[in-house]
Image: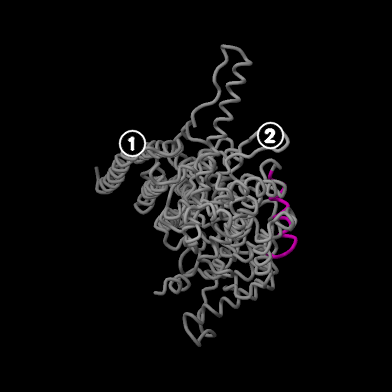
Amino acid sequence: MHALPSLHEVSGAFREGGLADRVILTLARAEAGRELQNEDRDALQHAVDFLSQAKRGYNWLSDPQVSRDSRAWARSFGTAARSLDRRTRDAEFLGDIEQMLQVVTQLRTTGIAESEPLKCARVFFNRVLRSAIDHIDAAISARDINDPGAPEWVLANSFGT
Amino acid sequence: MGTREQLWDLKIRCAQERCQALAAGIAGLQSRIQTTPAAGTVIRAINDAVQALQQYLGDLLHSPDLDLLTETELEAKIHFAARNLPVLYRLLGLVEHSDVSAVPAELIVPLRRELQNLFPDAELLVVASPTLNYSVLELSQYLRRIFENLNHAIPKYLPESVFRASIPSVEYDQGLLHCILAHEIGHPLYDLHHIEDKVMPISIEATHLQEAYHQAQREFAEQIAPGAQKQFPFDELRFKRYVTWTVNEMLPNWVQELAADLFGFMLFGPAYLFAFIHFSQSFALLDSASTSHPPDRERIRAMFRMLDRMYSADVFSQATREFLDLWRQIASRENADVQGVYEGVALKAIRDARVSDRLIDAVMAAMRPEQCYNAQRYRDDCGALGELIDAQIPPAEVMDPATGQTRAATITGILNAGWDRFLSGLLRFKEQVRDGSGMAPFDLTLRFNRFLLKSMELNDAVIAWGKAKDDIINRQSAGPDAECSYSPR
């Protein structure tokens, strides 16, 4: 009757974390001035896809259609929002994502990017990786696996604390 | 070696020790007698994954360019790799209690046969869990993911699919309720036939969603600071993320659950609907919904839509018809008490006639006629097998009136005839049971369920003997050098 959503969650988190893991190493190589290899370009393409999906997820409410794609957008949006600086406000979200999108796109096509935005992207993708680890832990311990995107006050209430 | 390197080396060595401990635990499990070969295969794959993880961790510190990573990044990288370990523990836990002492052997072979009719390369393992729940989970996909994470080749011996069916341990002899497994088989069928892509996209009325959004904002603000919602400094980004995630999880989950019910109905016929009502209504609220499951009333309503398409009222006995009429009425009432704003949004979207028609059409189109139970079979089974049940003769095989030859019954036939007699109060069955008239209803039901499980076991023997007989005849006609094609099960 009830599925075991936790392993499904784990699988998704491994996919997302694996992507972030590769992107971080690529950004570190770029920052150190190393020449990018094909695998680095692949990793950057995944980063572009992830950030583009996060943008679409952010805008989903203005044209709410549910599909396989929209589910992926919602997930990427959730992960991206959790991985930005905690002080990021709604109005700043798109700007921050757009800036990172420009950095990884430029890096992928030209092999170079400005240092400061590159550092920000590195911090961001490391948070994506840590978020994936948290997701795996939560899913394995069956803690809050139903609503990983829930605001904290919802979770606080649902657990009666 | 500097402090940084020593720390990472220690972390990796600790993780490797945990791998060794897990490998030792696996060795103990491998000695148990399993009900199907699948459990042994999964345990072997977990063991290989543990070895691969140990190797991967050992190689990690020699990866190129790691010196470019910050301490935080390197720590996250190591921990991410080590997270495969608790997942392997979890997978191992899922295989426990699948040995012969824990599960009803009568159920396993017929269930495996039903499954392999739908997924020819699949394997099955059955476990008894101490929860009031049925589930079917495909394990190979998670093992493959772990091998991919570790950049390791996927073992050739790992089947495309290994289904782990779980039944409640204390109810293992409730044969009639085990029809619930038909729903669980519906989940992999949903993926196999890409039903989501045939039903989606589903449009949600933007104004309806906005209303729900604002209502939820008010409710949450009220929960945090009662009476002060206007001043509440609302975190718009977090709320938007929550709403987007919730609706995009809930609606596809609901579509999948409804489709799994419809597949369950197609596979097992009315027996699945009867089992669903009897099982779920013992503990679930009719209009309760969650992110993962729609309200039961909606599920029953969807199954009635399919039943009314496929079965005319005259195929059912009077008692069964009365049961169905009652539940049709209950299912058609409005879901007045569905809690939660998003549940309301999802319910409205899913009850759109175009969506429900697309869903039923997609499920029906996915199945080949020989895979489906139908009205004619139901009528025949309730007639011929039902008479055997009344006489307390296990309905393992049935006589073809045209030829006078006997043939094996089917598991779905036994279960549907069983449900028909159960809903009729087991009157004639009770007459055949010693002290049946003084027996408590639950004891009689239990006796009946055990009788059905025994019938399935005999039915399996009939099928196996039939196959062996065919093989012997084929070999005799092919000549003395022909090889035996049947194998022990």
The residue wearing badge 1 is B31
CA–CA distance in space, label 2 to label 1: 48 Å
Relative to A2, does residue B109 appear above or below in the rendering?
A: above
Whether B47 is among the magenta residues is: no
Question: What residue is rendered at 47% in x and 80% in y?
Answer: B224
Is tag 2's residue or tag 1's residue first in the polypeptide sequence? 1
- Quarter of image, res B300: bottom right
Q: Which amino acid type is shown beneath numbered disc 2?
A: Gly
Is residue A115 visible in the rendered image? The answer is no
B202 or B40, which lies in front? Answer: B40
Percent across and percent down for residue A2 are 51, 57
Give the crowd class for mark 1: few <14, some 14-19, many >=20 residues within 10 Å.
few
The residue wearing badge 2 is B404
In this picture, residue B124 sits left or right of residue A143:
right
Question: What residue is rendered at 65% in x and 61% in y?
Answer: B319
- Extent of the magenta region: B349-367
Query: What secondary structure is found at the residue carrying circle 2?
Result: loop
Cβ–Cβ under 8 Å for marks 2 and 1 = no
Chain under numbered label 2? B
